[in-house]
Structures are given as C-alpha cells and as structure tokens.
Image (spheres, helix red, strand yellow):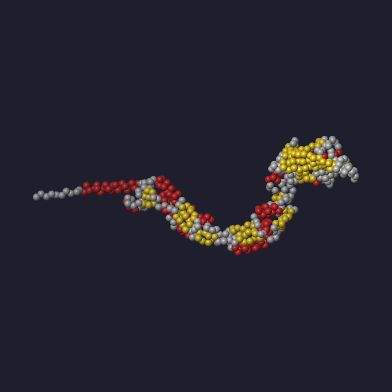
Amino acid sequence: MARHRAPTTSPFWALPAILIPLGVAGAGWMSHVSAEGRVVAPNVEFAGLDVTGMAPETVAYQVETRQVEVLATPLTIDLGESKVVLPAAELGFSYGYEETLSSLVAARHGPSPLSEFASWVTTPFITHQVEDVVHFDAATARERLERDDLVIDEPVEPSIVEEAGTLRLVPGHIGTGIDVESLVDQLESAPIATGPHRFVAAHVDLVPKVHDSQVASLVDELNEKTAPGMLTVVRNQSARVSAATIRKHLVSEVSAGSFVVTIDTEALRREIEEIFYKPVGDFVPPRLVVEDGEVRTMAMGQPPPICCSAGSVEAAALDMINGGSAFYLLDPRPDDDESILAWADGSQVREEVAKFTTNHPCCESRVVNIHTMADMLRGVYLVPGESLSLNEFVGERTRDKGFVPAGAIRRGHMVDEVGGGVSQFVTTIFNAAYLAGLDLDEYQSHSIYFSRYPFGREATISIPGPDLVMTNTTDYPILIWPTYDDRSITVTIYSTPHLQVTELEQRITKRRLCTHVETDRQRIYPDGRVVVDTIEANYRPAEGIDCNGRVIPEL
C-alpha cells in the first residue's frame, strides 16, 4: 500500500506575511517621525477641535483665537444686592500662548523613542487632548478687587462743616467691602478655560481711617483759632473778615491716613475782594495824542491795583488757622478785568464821536485864558463812570498858571478878573460833552445870554462856583482834545461810537422878568435803553438887573 505524504509549507512563503505588515508599520512610523514639527500628530484635539495634520501656522491661529476667547471669559462677582461682571484678563489671568502652541506641536511626540513609539501605537485608540495653559497673578487680581466699583458701601470719613458761623463735626461711618483674599483664593483655583464662572463675595467692614474723636478735638481748636477773624489791610484800606467767613471756606480731607484741614484760599480771596470792592490805588491812563485826526498811543496806561494777591491771602489764611496773628497785610494785584485792561491800553478810543466849536474875536486878552484852559484840558482821559470837575482839575485861575485879567460876569455885572473869558471854553466843552452823550452833573448857564453860544445850552464857571462837572456814562473811555486858532476854540471827544444822541425839543418860559429855557436830549444805548434828560438855563432881563427888575448892587 503506497503511502501519501502531506505537503509541507516552506518558510519562504510565510516570510511575506510577516514582513509586509512590518513594512507598513515601519513606513507609518517613519512618516510619524519625519512629520514631527511640520504638522500636528493624528488624533489630537484642542478646545473641542480636531487639529490632526494642521501645520504650525494654522495651529498658531487657532491658539491666538483661543487666547482671546479665554481671556474674555466673563467672571461674575456676586456682591449681594448687585453683581459685577469682569473679563478674566482684568482679574489677573493671562494665557500661555507659546506654551499651549508648543504642547500642540509636540503632541504624541514623546521624550524618548520608546515612549514616542508607544504613543504612536495607541493613536487609533486614544484621542490626545491638549489643554489651555492659563496663568494667574494674585497681585493683579487683588489690585482690581480693591477698586471702588467693588466696594459695596464706602466708609465715610469724619469731616467738618460750618453752620451758623460755627464749625461742627460730621461723624464718619463704617462701610462694607468684600473679602478680597477669599476671592483671590477662589479665582486661583477656578478653571476659567471651561467657561463663565460665578464667585460669591464675602462681606467685611471698612473702617474709616480717622476716628471721630480726633476730629472733634480739632474742631474745638479751629473754632478757637478763628474766633477773632482777620483784620486785613491793603494799602490805605482796612476791613475785618469775620470768623464765619473764614470758617465756611475751611476744607477737610483724609490724606495718607491723617485728617488734614486746609482753606479754599481762592474762594476766600474772592470774598475778601467783595469787601475791598474799590481799587486800592490809582488807574494810570494811557497817554494819547491826536495827529491829523488820528488817535495815537504814546504810552500804555496801567489798570488800578485791587485786592488781593492769591499768595498773600493764602499765606495769611494758613498762618491764622495754624494759630498765628489776626492782623494781616495783604498785597494788591493788578486788575485783570478785560474791560479795564482795554481802558488802560487806550484801544477803545478810536475815532471822533463829538465836536463843538465856538468863535471869538482875535487877539483879545480873554483868548489867552481860553487857550490856557484848552491846553490844560488837552489829553484828559475819562474811563466809564469817571467824573471830571473843571474847578477841581484846573483849580483857581491865577497868573502863575498863565491866566490874565479879562472880562467876566460877577453878580450880574461885567467886571475884569484874572481868568475872565474861560467860560467860552466851558461852553464849548459843555456842548461837546452834550453831543457825546455824557452826563452833565453840575452846570450853570450864564446869567446874561451871549449870541455866540447856543441859546439855552451853555455854561459858565467861577471860583468857588459854579462848576462844570461831567461823568462818562458811556460804555467806553473818552479822550478830550481841545484845539484852537486865533478866532475859534474847538473841543473834540474821541471814543468808540455807540450812542445815538438827539436833541428833542426846547421850551421857553418866563419866570417873572427872567427867561427860563429847557432843552430835552435823548440818548439811545446799544441795549435799547432810552434816556431823556433836560438841560436848563436862566437869563436875566439885562446886565445888573434881577428877575424882579431890581438893580443888583455891585460889590
């Protein structure tokens, strides 16, 4: 019987079954090794996103996006009756961008060939999660948590107030804050990358830095120190500043843990200036000349000194509340009012606003007096509200001043006296002032009418009276500029035109034998205000005769 031999498998044919899988695995391994640093390893996730095979630049973009998202994570701090929501970045959190990116690129690439091979082998079975790298800075968080918007109820420091002229204590009170250290601990352990979080803040008392008793003692001391007030002197003016005035400008605050009392010196200075409301010195007018009808400034003026310099008020007030004297010399300061400065520089005297001329024969002795008076008044500068008295300004007309004897009226009779004839200048300046809209506060017409003057609108002058007093009630300074020749005298007034001056009507009546003349003038101001006044004149029936027809005895 023949034997059948079973076929045998040659090792040669089994070898491919072993080598082929090994080759495939080797190729995969070589591919994994060669891809290290160029793409992310397979089966790697980051923030819920599969990043397998992503190039480093693409992964970097994903990490940047994730960084913005994590740092913007809203963190709610529950204060009790209110809540504050802040981004994570504001509460001390920062994102480890480079560290997170490095973790993604190095995912599944182990520190040794064996561990890396093991990681590679498990790739199909285990997903590798790369976590965000987040850092927390407790100091930054603490600084933010200590800000005022997280204080539930601010503590109130004690303070002082002035009531009915006396200082009194306003007590402080305890506030409510949050337990910052407890919140810092909660934040440090919070996984903020997982999304919004809520933290409940524990409450703590916030105690004022200064105790009421300290301030109460200081209040008593300040009341005692300020009781005498301040006797202040500025140049030749003096006034007492009351204790109540000083006390109401005291200011208290807590600084560096100490209670500090200062004084609002600017407010006190303004109040003292209301007491010293007048200038404490003279206004120096500019020196102006008129050439060919044009006003030119030869020298600037100076505004008047007023009370008071800020430095001197501050020094006096601080000295007083620190227990110093109650008597203080204060320094004046230049008036800084824009209007006053314009008055001082002469810029508002721009052009002619009124002119009046009267005529006279040539070469009479009275002409010398008219010209002398004109020369003395040329260049007079009146600011708004300022008055001019011709008798005060010129004084007695004497030979020493250049006046000579000439005809004048004394008690209704024509006489010769030194300075006679100056009334023609007075009438001329009177009419220029009338047309310029100035107030004519004091004046008197001649007792006998002269045809060279406007009927009912003229004035005379004598020592000690009558006088001519005028006030600049316009809005701008005026310059008085007389000029003359052998046969006439002219007074021109320069300023800024702004008034409308009109003569309305004239009424003539008899008062016994005398003639009474009333002339109405209307002035319209820029604000629409209308002022009507009346100029009056009285004329005797003849030289030396009174209104009853009786002869006036000569002296």
Of residue 219 and residue 359, the one placed in the foreground of this image is 359
Q: Residue at x 75, y 35 (%)?
A: 292
Q: Residue at x 40, y 47 (%)?
A: 59
* Residue 485 x, y percent position in the rendering: 81, 36
Q: Is residue 316 visible?
A: yes
Where residue 214 sits, quadrant-wise, is bottom right
Of residue 537 and residue 515, the one placed in the foreground of this image is 515
Give the side of residue 359 with respect to residue 13, left or right: right
* Residue 526 x, y percent position in the rendering: 69, 41
Height in image: 473 above or below 259? above
Q: Residue at x 65, y 62 (%)?
A: 221
* Residue 546 x, y percent position in the rendering: 87, 43
Height in image: 548 above or below 168? above
Q: Is residue 181 visible?
A: no
Where residue 314 sits, quadrant-wise, is bottom right
Of residue 404 and residue 400, the one placed in the foreground of this image is 404
Give the side of residue 402 with respect to residue 301, left or right: right
* Residue 457 x, y percent position in the rendering: 80, 40
Height in image: 371 above or below 268? above
Q: Quadrant of the C terminus?
A: top right
**Hey, which residue is sitting farthest left in the picture?**
1
Of residue 227 and residue 341, the one placed in the foreground of this image is 227
Q: Residue at x 60, y 64 (%)?
A: 213
